[in-house]
Amino acid sequence: MIDKSSYSELEERIKKLEKKLNRCKDGNDVHFPATFYKIIVEQAADAIYVHDMDGRYVECNQAACDMLGYTRHDLLQKSVPEVDKEVDFENAKHLWEGLEEGDNVFFPGNARKLDGSLCPVDVRLCSCMSEGKKYIIAIVRDMTEIRMKEDALRKSKMRYRAVVDTQTELICRWKPGGELTFVNEAYCRYFSKDKSQLIKTNFFELIPKEDHEKVKKHFASLTLLQPTATHEHRVIMPNGDIRWMSWINRAIFDDQGKIIEMQDVGRDITDCKQAKEHVKEMQAKLNHADKMAALGQLVAGVAHEVNNSINFISGALPSLKLNVEKLKDVLKQQAAPPANNTANSDLSNLVEEIAILFENINQGTKRSVKIINDLRSFSSPKKEKGVLTDVHAILDSILALLRYQYRDRIEIIKKYSAENSTIFCFPNHLSQAFMNVILNGVQAISGKGVITILTKNNSETIMIGFRDNGCGIHKEIKNKIFEPFFTTKDVGEGTGLGLSISYGIVKNILGEILVDSDVGRGTEFTIILPLMQKSSAVRRTSGNGLDETAVKII
């Protein structure tokens, strides 16, 4: 009785014989002479060897001789182990014995040449029967050129990868839906993640949601005619910070003109954008300072001319008033009899109206004189002897003077953190600057509120902050508040010179005044002054009021 394994082997042998029979039938009864097949073998580009089961060569073509460097006569005198002593003959023979007709075995290897060098090859083995004897046919293809090309390609890929990974710019590739397919080392370092954590994640996960539509619209604008474009957008860092990136984007299209992948090269431009904003801000401050300087010159001229006219008016008023009094005495002496009461009454009313007009003119003149003095303070502060002054003492003095303005309505919170609050300045002028800023906060608060005054040292300066929770300042007018005559108050309630005078005073002692405000939340004025002290008796001639004693920054 045949066991199951023997039956399977027999069945497999029958299938192979059937295949062999079918191949014979497929010959279409066309028979070629042996020379025909010999020509085919000789013309083949691949090396063809035929050896017996002991490994001795019995036939080969010219390509085989050329590959190994033997003549046909010499090669047919040798066996496989003699040509290549490193061949494991026992394993090779075991492989040959297992080959049946119709079987094929393929493997890569190396062929040993006559000069001892190795040639990379791909080997295909099959077996055949001739006169009852089994032979092995080896078809060997020289892979030297292909291996060289593969090696060159591999090295090229390695160089490309090395170049890409050593770039400081961020490089990535992603599919239209956003799935990342490649990131370089710089990209990983920037986002503090490994490639395994980034590949197959979505490109848009690192972009704030509010920017998604804008970024997608940019990528949708890329076409075959314009596949490359530059774009800036924000990214989310691992710690939650938002930074700016500039990308050079390139779309990769298929044959139908459809985007199949995006390749981006990016760099962080956050510092650059901040620097540009800082330059823009400094340029705006410089322009404002130039404008204020020009206004100062204009105001000085206007104040001088208006003051001359006011002097004429104020100088004429006492004489005119005296003459009117004399006229009144004369009219009294020449008054009509008591019967003419109507004329006397009209005369009396006229004199009273003249007196009222005189008082109005006098009040208007005083107000004009005050405005002129304020304009002069703005354009050219009076020279005053600079002295060492405690800023905290000035603030306390001003708050005491203004107490009637804010008591029972506004809470004053003092946070004096500056350890060094002594500066070299003009106390009266600095007091006026502080007073104007505090009054601005008091007037900005309707009803009850809070004003916080804080000080602190920063390097070589002292910072004085005035923060109120008043109505705030609209963005459109924030840059105008230091201009002369600019005011948001009703006509007759303010001259618009308070903050402009404070600006001039602070600039005159080499300081800076800044404002930050939100409508409905309040305003904060920040005055930054250099810490100064008296130096040796060196005189200055700058004309800014510090010409008696030089100063130096601590």
Image (tube, rainbow, N blue to C red):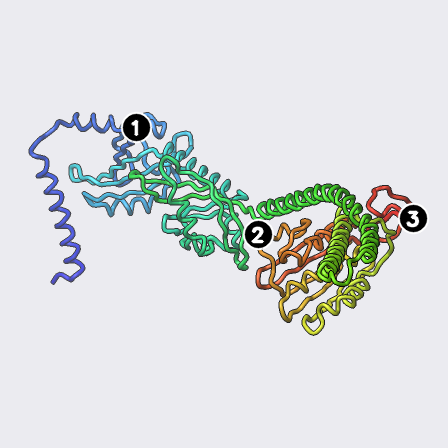
Residue 554 in view = no
Q: Is residue 252 left or right of residue 301?
A: left
From this view, report whether residue 417 is shown above or below residue 113: below
Q: Amino acid at mark 3?
A: Ser
Q: Amino acid at mark 1?
A: Ala
Residue 40 point in image, percent of width and height: 21, 28
Mark with earlier residue (1, 2): 1
Residue 237 point in image, percent of width and height: 52, 56
Residue farthest along the left direction in this orientation: 29
Q: Which residue is mark 1?
A: 63
Query: Circle 1 sits in a helix, a strand or a loop, which is it?
Result: helix
Measured Cα–Cα span from mark 2 to mark 3: 47 Å
Measured Cα–Cα span from mark 1 to mark 2: 89 Å
Q: Badge 1, how many Cα within 10 Å: few under 14, some, many 20+?
A: many
Residue at 82% x, 64% y is 393
Query: Circle 2 sits in a helix, a strand or a loop, which is it?
Result: helix
Mark with earlier residue (3, 1): 1
Q: Which residue is mark 2?
A: 476
From this view, report whether residue 408 is shown above or below residue 23: below
Residue 90 in view = yes
From this view, report whether residue 544 is shown above or below residue 359: above
Q: Which residue is mark 3?
A: 536
Measured Cα–Cα span from mark 3 to mark 1: 103 Å
Q: Badge 2, how many Cα within 10 Å: few under 14, some, many 20+?
A: few
Residue 182 point in image, percent of width and height: 43, 48
Q: Badge 3, how many Cα within 10 Å: few under 14, some, many 20+?
A: few
